[in-house]
Image (tube, grey):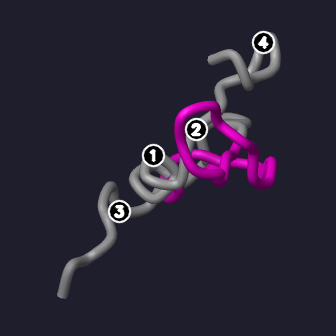
Amino acid sequence: ESHGESGTIQITRSTYDLIRNQFDCESRGTIKVKGADDMETWHVLGRKADPGPAIDSLA
């Protein structure tokens, strides 16, 4: 939260991987997080018009 921008939803790689088929996201690059490694982040821009499958096929 301390690294985000006001009025936006910032997510990490693990969340992006879960929602990328349903939501448009914009890469924000890598940020330094205190007490952790560098993290890739994205901003959620909105829901996609045609979301497609909820979860990528594991097969």
Q: Give the magenta part as a residue range.
A: 20-42
Give whichever of 34, 19 is nearer the camera: 34
Residue type beneath disc 4 = Gly
What percent of the width, then of the height, locates residue 7? 78, 12
Residue 18 x/y as whole percent: 39, 53
Residue appearing at x 72%, y 42% in the figure: 32
What residue is disc 4 on?
7
The residue to which callout 2 is attached is 11
Which residue carries the number 3 mark?
53
Amino acid type, label 1: Thr
Q: Secondary structure at mark 3?
A: loop
The stretch drawn in magenta includes residue 32: yes
Q: Earlier in the sequence, mark 4 or mark 3?
A: 4
Dot label at residue 15: 1
Number of numbered callouts drawn: 4
Do callouts 1 and 3 mark residues in contact (Cβ within 8 Å)? no
